[in-house]
């Protein structure tokens, strides 16, 4: 019995490590997506509408090749298709605003502002999902917002429109995550992944075609088409990570993205974060980790209450 228990514990530990590894791989792919988008936006002269559209078209082609054309009816069947469509538009908004922000901001700046998403999710989870927060987590959210203010420094630093675009992209992504959590109760992951691309493919098509600029060489084409690979594969591995490890375990590792974004920012663009971005990011990360800790404590208290109620009733 002891050997069986030890074996189960070892398997559980191995699964958690696999989930953490997958999360880190997904974050590397997301960093590659942002770095590629920034490179295209700043050095190719292509309009954002075209880059955004090709990002979704290439990802859609990748998904169809992966699952097969015959799987399309299955991928289109959803028990909550109106919510899936709304989520798809939010994905489009998040991607487009992020690409617009990357034209003027460093990779680390864009990501640090994007770290606001979990805090916005925690705030909106009450009215959207009935998951209301207590005062400790509300305080952590306020501290997190203060960290972003350190990065932006309103009134002291020159205002970059990219910061506004990054904030709008973060808001879209936060509501996108809430809908993802809601839809996980009704639809399988492959359906949600497929629907997430549709608004980008069809809504952006007329804008991309109207503003179309032919890429000047094969390298630019390769970069454009690779955006679908980085984004699609990254989201798929991201979902796989949560199958191997609980959300509370994986949440702090999201901040590993700051390392990968900073590394690519230096290697590709010779850019390093300034002291304000580093200070603000540390504040956001600390408050985010505390927020995860409080969620874990709340979950443990709820589990103990449920176990006590069961033992009393029996």
Image: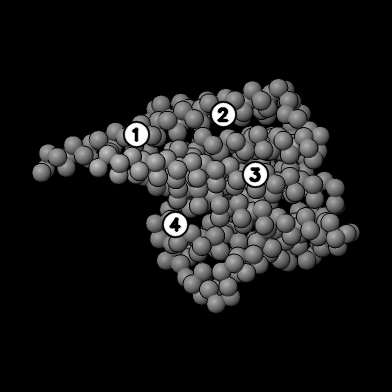
Residue under label 2: 284
Eyeballing the image, is 181 above or below 73? above
Indicate the quadrant where residue 72 lies.
bottom right
Residue under label 3: 28
Q: CA distance from mark 4 to mark 3?
A: 26 Å
Please state the horizontal and vertical placement of residue 133, each as a whole percent of the image.
Answer: 39, 35
What residue sits 53% from the left and 26% below the top?
A: 286
Mark 2 or 3, which is nearer the eye? 3
- Horizontal side, residue 44 vs residue 302: left or right: right
Please state the horizontal and vertical placement of residue 187, each as a whole percent of the image.
Answer: 44, 62
Residue under label 1: 298
Q: CA distance from mark 1 to mark 2?
A: 21 Å
What residue sits 88% from the left and 59% below the top?
A: 217
Residue under label 4: 183
Please state the horizontal and vertical placement of residue 228, each as a whole percent of the image.
Answer: 68, 58
Indicate the quadrant where residue 160 lies.
top right
Mark 3 or 1, which is nearer the eye? 3
């Amino acid at each position: 019995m002891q050997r069986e228990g030890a074996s189960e514990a070892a398997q559980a530990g191995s699964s958690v490590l696999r989930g953490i590894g997958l999360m880190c791989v997904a974050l590397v792919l997301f960093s590659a997506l942002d770095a590629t988008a920034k490179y295209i936006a700043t050095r190719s002269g292509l309009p954002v509408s075209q880059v955004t559209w090709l990002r979704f078209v290439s990802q859609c082609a990748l998904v169809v090749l992966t699952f097969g054309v015959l799987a399309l009816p299955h991928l289109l069947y959803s028990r909550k298709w109106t919510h899936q469509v709304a989520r798809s538009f939010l994905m489009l908004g998040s991607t487009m605003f992020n690409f617009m922000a990357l034209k003027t901001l460093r990779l680390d700046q864009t990501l640090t502002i994007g770290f606001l998403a979990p805090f916005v999710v925690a705030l909106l989870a009450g009215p959207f999902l009935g998951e209301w927060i207590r005062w400790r987590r509300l305080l952590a959210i306020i501290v997190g917002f203060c960290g972003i203010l350190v990065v932006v420094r309103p009134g002291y630093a020159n205002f970059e429109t990219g910061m506004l675009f990054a904030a709008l992209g973060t808001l879209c992504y936060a509501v996108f995550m809430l809908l993802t959590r809601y839809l996980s109760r009704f639809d399988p992951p492959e359906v949600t992944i497929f629907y997430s691309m549709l608004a980008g493919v069809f809504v952006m098509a007329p804008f991309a075609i109207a503003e179309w600029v032919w890429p000047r060489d094969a390298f630019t084409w390769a970069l454009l088409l690779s955006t679908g690979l980085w984004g699609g594969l990254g989201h798929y591995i991201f979902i796989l990570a949560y199958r191997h490890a609980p959300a509370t375990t994986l949440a702090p590792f999201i901040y590993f993205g700051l390392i990968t974004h900073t590394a690519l920012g230096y290697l590709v663009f010779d850019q390093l974060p300034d002291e304000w971005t580093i200070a603000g990011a540390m504040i956001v990360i600390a408050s985010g980790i505390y927020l995860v800790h409080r969620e874990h404590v709340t979950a443990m208290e709820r589990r103990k209450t449920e176990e006590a109620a069961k033992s009393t009733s029996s």
